[in-house]
Image (spheres, rainbow, N blue to C red):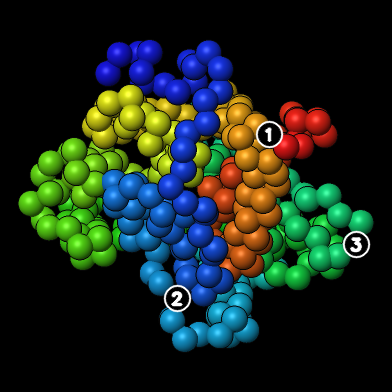
Amino acid sequence: MASHSQDYNIRQKPVPARRSGVSPEISPRSNMADPTSIGSRSAQAMAAAAMSMRGQDPQHMNDTKAKTVLKEAVDAVVNSFAKHTQGYGRVNVVEALQEFWQMKQDRGADLKNGALVVYESQPANAPPYVCFVSLPGGSCFGSFQHCPTKAEARRSAAKIALMNSVFNEHPSRKISDEFIERAVRDACASFKGNMEEADNPNTGIGAFRFMLESNKTRTMLEFQELMTVFQLLHWNGSLKAMRERNCSRQEVLSHYSHRALDDDMRSQMALDWIAREQEISSIIERELEIAERELESARLAGRELRFFKEKRDILVLALSQIGPSDSLA
């Protein structure tokens, strides 16, 4: 694929990519809602990676019980980590999380941006307070409990992030040949495909297999970080725009598999939404309301949040760039 068609960032002016639907609501009972459930079959098949990464919550578990189970699971992992690293006693989860990632780097983990764990407290004058934490690879988690103080919100975010960080080290969380075969079969069953499509990279199932094969030996969190880029491209309408420019799935996957989610990509997506606003008044505000609800629901369920948070931040950026006159029809 020629360089001028590989990257939508090079467009001279923002051209809104048509979207085939509205972002779906997130169910608080699903372990990882599929943000690409509306749109191309290829994007749907790729999204099965994220869905295969985590076991589903029991379908009939009520919210109160689910929150209790989540808290017990988090506490169990944190306490186990504390016993093996610091002995018995109360663990400082904020320090433990940082030490965990520093330990990974010291042992040779490829952390391109270093081992620093970054916290982001949401502005608030009264409880409940909310805090997000971004791990060195880009994964994001948030406080999942009702937090009466900012310090407690920080600890809550650190707890869920530490649990996922520790669990991610288990051998079962690495992408292996066995996992790929199982995930491809699940994707075929979910999207009513057939296994013959898995050998053709121009089909949705084939693109899914290509992504998995390209990331063999990576952990599920690492793979989810990569999938976030494609989930955002699908949500933003960019994948459809590239297909309309006759870019093949293989070309798009090969290019964006090596493309980091950076400020340039966020800025271009914000420009796309600003251009959309000129055609459909108040679309940014409406989409932002949806993104806020998705993020809140996913945070309280203890899910990985980067896709939801990036959507919200892109829309906030777009909204900040338009004046009152720009948002009026």
Q: Earlier in the sequence, mark 3 or mark 1?
A: 3
Residue furthest to the front in view is 329
- Whichever of labels 2 and 3 marks the residue nearer the N terminus, that label is 2
Q: Are marks 2 and 3 in contact (CB under 8 Å)?
A: no
Task: Name the front one of labels 3 and 1.
Answer: 1
Residue on which the image places disc 3: 126
Q: CA distance from mark 1 to mark 2?
A: 35 Å
Q: Amino acid at mark 3?
A: Ala
Image quadrant in which you'd find residue 38 = bottom left
- The image shows residue 295 at horizontal and vertical percentages of 62, 57
Q: Nearer the viewer, mark 1 or mark 2?
A: 1
Query: Could you classify mark 3 by the number of other residues whose Cα lies within 10 Å: few (under 14), some (14-19), or many (20 or more)?
Result: few
Query: Taking 227 as reference, is 175 left or right?
Result: left
Q: Residues within 10 Å of mark 1 (few under 14, many from 20)?
A: many
Horizontal and vertical percent position of residue 34 = 43, 59
Mark 1 = which residue?
Answer: 318
- What SS does tag 2 mark? loop
Quarter of the N terminus within the rendering: top left
Q: Residue 255: x, y in percent?
A: 34, 26
Residue type, mark 1 in image: Ala
The residue labelled by disc 2 is 57
- Residue at 63% in and 49% down: 287
| Mark 3 element type | loop
Asked if residue 176 can be seen in this view, the reply is: yes
